[in-house]
Image (cartoon, rainbow, N blue to C red):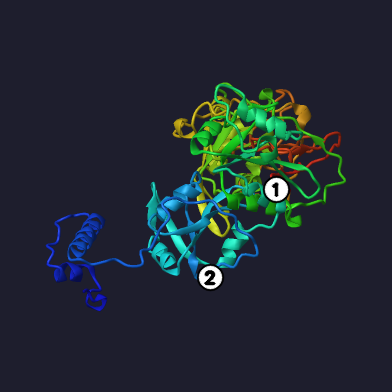
């Protein structure tokens, strides 16, 4: 009855069917209402629609193997996703298009955290082409970039061959929950009891048999584990236990996906992510950071660093701070993560004095950090230990701590700021990579012996002195995991030496 060659535009269809256009200002609503009128008119005229195309209303979980054959023209890459974004949120963004089972793979950074990208696999080439048209559409306040990707790209992220992970993913569960920060010796029984205790007990699929621990090639635990629950309601109930403790550690919980399980297992077993260059050095496990190691009160001896790149690590922060990093106390860098375990782009840093934090905030606020070939301005704000503790202990959301803290002069020309004990001061020695243009102390400056405090040069730095811890210390990123260690009993001369061991192996 109808010839498709005669109607290649919705306005032409309206004209052929003698339908009066609707006066609707919103283009999308006008388009939808016009299509509704066209379909209704065609049905009234006796038209029969053939070969209906079915689209899944909800994203379904599925397992992808490295040996799977994926059509090249069915995959897109989405960038700029919010860090709390889940696979279900991505599926909603592409609503109306048919996504394969397990077809949303959230990408992880080198630190094992989501990096704001996802690969999405559609059932048909035509749906992939329609997905590309959603380039720069929004999720919340963020616009999403959508590009073409290959089947190999999808397999590199979502594919896996680990038999233990494959067996776990075949269990009869609807929602996967990832646990981070588990104690070294945590057992499946401990995990099951963690979820079943308290006022809101939640049963995990298959009990102790259904707990999947992640290990390095040498058998060491990474501090990660996965469990399944059967329903969305049980998942919501289980996630309420986020940051509850197991032993002396608090545990992070967040929703996960089949692709994330595959990625985490593949990376934990990859020799490139398991460095053994320090395996013969005697290490002792470091207990959880005691409360007395965190500063407190209203003394403004901390700085708050904001707008950091998500991929930024501790090394990049120290490099950005330059000479000011010498005044960071041992175990004094604390990265802030959101409820889903993703970097928030924020860090708190404890300094050894109010003067040091004032100098860092004054000289580095709104300066640029160069990272991965891009530059980004960084906010550095002086704050108190109380502000820092509220965020790190989860007492106050990060966005409720004011950022427009008034900077006050911490000292005048006739009063030196609080200093370090004289026994901790050594002749200055900067590593070759440390920039000397940031107001480095004069070599002719002297220390005031009579006052017991180091005098200040005109630029506000401790002259000709640098504080060096007498042991190898690490800068922790809460929550601590089983792969963080502290070397003890070995003395080191200046300059300071750092051993950083992260979630995916030694650095």
Residue 434 seen from this side:
no
Q: Quadrant of residue 255?
A: top right
Q: Is residue 263 left or right of residue 27?
A: right
In x, y percent, where is residue 319?
64, 48
Q: Secondary structure at mark 1?
A: loop
In x, y percent, where is residue 357?
58, 34
Q: Tell me how far mark 2 sits from mark 1, CA to CA.
A: 31 Å
Label of residue 72 in the image: 2
Q: Is residue 271 left or right of residue 12?
A: right
Decide: few, some or many residues near mark 1? Use Cα within 10 Å; few <14, some 14-19, many ≥20: many
Mark 2 and mark 1 lie on one chain; the one further toward the N terminus is 2
Pointer 1 residue: 504
Is 336 in front, or is 405?
Answer: 336
Image: 33 above or below 124: above
Q: Is residue 28 left or right of residue 143?
A: left
Residue at 62% x, 49% y: name it. 170
Q: Secondary structure at mark 2?
A: helix
In x, y percent, where is residue 106?
54, 52
- Quarter in which the N terminus is drawn: bottom left
Query: Is label 2 in contact with label 1 (beta carbons under 8 Å)?
Result: no
Q: Of circles 2 and 1, which is in front?
A: 2
Label of residue 421 in the image: none
In x, y percent, where is residue 91?
45, 52
């Amino acid at each position: 009855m109808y010839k498709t060659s005669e109607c290649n535009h919705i306005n032409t269809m309206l004209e052929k069917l003698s339908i009066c256009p609707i006066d609707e200002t919103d283009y999308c609503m006008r388009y939808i209402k016009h299509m509704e009128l066209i379909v209704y008119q065609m049905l009234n005229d006796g038209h029969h629609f053939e070969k209906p195309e079915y689209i899944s209303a909800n994203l379904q979980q599925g397992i992808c193997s490295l040996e799977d054959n994926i059509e090249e023209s069915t995959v897109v890459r989405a960038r700029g996703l919010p860090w709390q974004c889940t696979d279900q949120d991505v599926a909603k963004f592409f609503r109306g298009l048919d996504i394969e089972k397990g077809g949303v793979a959230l990408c992880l950074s080198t630190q094992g955290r989501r990096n704001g990208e996802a690969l999405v696999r559609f059932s048909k080439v035509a749906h992939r082409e329609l997905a590309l048209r959603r380039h720069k559409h929004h999720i919340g306040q963020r616009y999403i970039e959508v590009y073409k990707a290959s089947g190999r790209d999808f397999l590199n992220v979502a594919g896996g061959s680990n038999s233990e992970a494959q067996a776990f993913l075949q269990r009869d569960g609807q929602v996967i929950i990832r646990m981070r920060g588990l104690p070294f010796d945590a057992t499946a029984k401990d995990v099951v009891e963690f979820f079943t205790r308290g006022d809101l007990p939640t049963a995990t699929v298959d009990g102790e048999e259904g707990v999947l621990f992640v290990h390095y090639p040498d058998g060491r635990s990474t501090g990660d584990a996965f469990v399944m629950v059967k329903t969305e309601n049980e998942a919501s109930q289980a996630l309420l236990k986020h940051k509850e403790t197991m032993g002396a550690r608090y545990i992070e919980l967040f929703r996960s996906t089949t692709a994330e399980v595959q990625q985490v297992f593949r990376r934990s077993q990859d020799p490139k992510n398991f460095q053994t260059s320090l395996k013969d050095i005697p290490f002792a496990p470091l207990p959880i950071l005691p409360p007395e190691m965190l500063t407190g009160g209203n003394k403004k001896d901390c700085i708050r660093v904001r707008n950091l790149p998500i991929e930024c690590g501790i090394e990049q922060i120290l490099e950005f701070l330059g000479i000011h990093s010498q005044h960071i106390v041992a175990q004094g860098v604390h990265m802030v993560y959101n409820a889903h375990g993703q970097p928030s782009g924020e860090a708190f840093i404890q300094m050894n004095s109010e003067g040091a934090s004032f100098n860092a905030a004054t000289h580095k606020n709104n300066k640029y950090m160069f990272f991965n070939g891009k530059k980004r301005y960084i906010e550095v704000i002086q704050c108190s230990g109380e502000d820092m503790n509220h965020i790190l202990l989860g007492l106050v959301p990060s966005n409720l701590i004011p950022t427009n803290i008034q900077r006050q002069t911490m000292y005048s020309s006739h009063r030196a700021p609080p200093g370090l004990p004289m026994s901790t001061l050594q002749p200055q020695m900067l590593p070759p990579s440390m920039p000397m243009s940031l107001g480095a102390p004069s070599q002719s400056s002297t220390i005031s012996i009579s006052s017991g405090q180091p005098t200040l040069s005109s630029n506000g730095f401790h002259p000709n002195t640098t504080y060096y811890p007498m042991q190898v210390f690490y800068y922790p990123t809460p929550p601590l995991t089983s792969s963080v260690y502290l070397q003890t009993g070995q003395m080191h001369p200046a300059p300071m030496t750092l051993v950083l061991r992260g979630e995916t192996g030694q650095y």
